[in-house]
Image: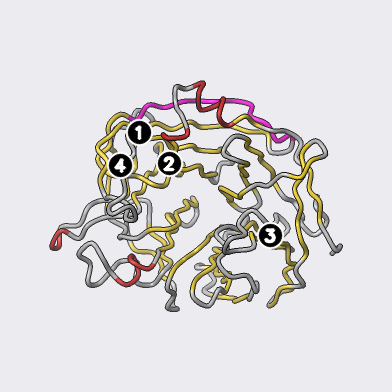
Amino acid sequence: MDQQITIGFKNCIDLAELMKKYDHSSGDYVTMQTGYDGNIYILLNKNIPERIDGMFVPAESNSIFAVLVLQVDWHEEKIIHEKYYDLGVQKMNYSFIQPISQGFLLVAARCRYNKGNPDKNASVIDLDGNMIREFCIGDGISQCLFHPDMGIITGYFDEGIFGNYGWKEPLGAYGVRVWGDDGQDIWKADKQIYDCYAMNVSGTGDIWYYYYDEFKLVKTNIKEAYDREYIPEIKGADSFIISEDETTLVMDKGYDANDEFAAKKILYDKLGDEVPVIFMYEGKECRVRLISSYGSKAVFVEDWKHMFIRSFQSLCTGN
């Protein structure tokens, strides 16, 4: 690879104006995720609960949720269709949204054990917000993606792995799990981790996850039952992209540098040297954060005002 990769965005989406268009502000923003279908999903809550002691996310919300679905042209990097869904009042304090065949999958990061009657923190709802089914997939969820051929893929942070909110035997103890779309246990990782910092799913169906405290990146295929470990030599990253040709990883540079990025070539069982990645728009460098990635598709935000989208075919060349 070159000494530096410069990637130019084709278009800039005014995120603040987009939210305002649907009578929302940044204060209503919960999360933005890309789905397996290539659409972008923005989850909104009109009354986001305050954190407990300023740190811990409450399990319940009992407030009005909505979702803005953006159908985009990834080649031209622009929105081609918008659809807004009012989901009405929802009990749980949802933190993740993914498309699923019947409508939306909503998942709350926290849930209480309730002395053996745990909160059901995963819900499949229709486009009007009506509950189709709900089930529990454990407390302390840090990552959640849905893949139609695998199911619900979840990563957990420390309280989901070691136990809190009443859990002595946490469902997230393995750090990374896969569930069926009705909550059945499909797969769990076989190594102990402390915190799943970031996750992605490649186009071939491999699950990639990056974890604390060893800061390793793992590629796993649950059908073929193999793991491959990589050492990115980056501490504290919270996002990464796998190029469509699966030749390159791009990752933020970790603690205090989440708006800086590096690319590394994937060489079967190891990673190549680090190469800085610079993002540009209209001749100016963008200080962006990677907000959402699903395979090679990624959504970036600058100052929570400007949104950029891009599908990376091969990060080795910046194409």
Q: Residues within 10 Å of mark 2 (few under 14, many from 20)?
A: many
What is the C-alpha distance between the residues marked 1 and 2? 9 Å
Q: Secondary structure at mark 1?
A: strand
Image location (x, y in percent) of residue 171: 30, 66
Residue 295 left/right relative to 66: right
What is the C-alpha distance between the residues marked 1 and 3? 33 Å
Q: Amino acid at mark 4?
A: Pro
Which residue is depicted at the point 52% across and 74% down?
225
Residue at image mark 4: 49
Q: Is residue 32 magenta?
A: no
Q: Which residues are magenta?
A: 76-87
Closer to the chain start, of discs 4 and 3, is 4
Q: Mark 3 and 2 residues: CB-CB less than 8 Å, in contact?
A: no
Residue 30 tag number:
2
Q: Amino acid at mark 1?
A: Phe
Q: Secondary structure at mark 4?
A: loop
Q: Mark 4 and 2 residues: CB-CB less than 8 Å, in contact?
A: no
Closer to the chain start, of discs 4 and 1, is 4
Residue 250 tag number:
3
- From the viewer's perspective, is the residue at label 1 or at label 2 nearer? 2
The quadrant in which residue 194 appears is bottom left
- From the viewer's perspective, is the residue at label 4 or at label 1 nearer? 4
Q: Is residue 84 magenta?
A: yes
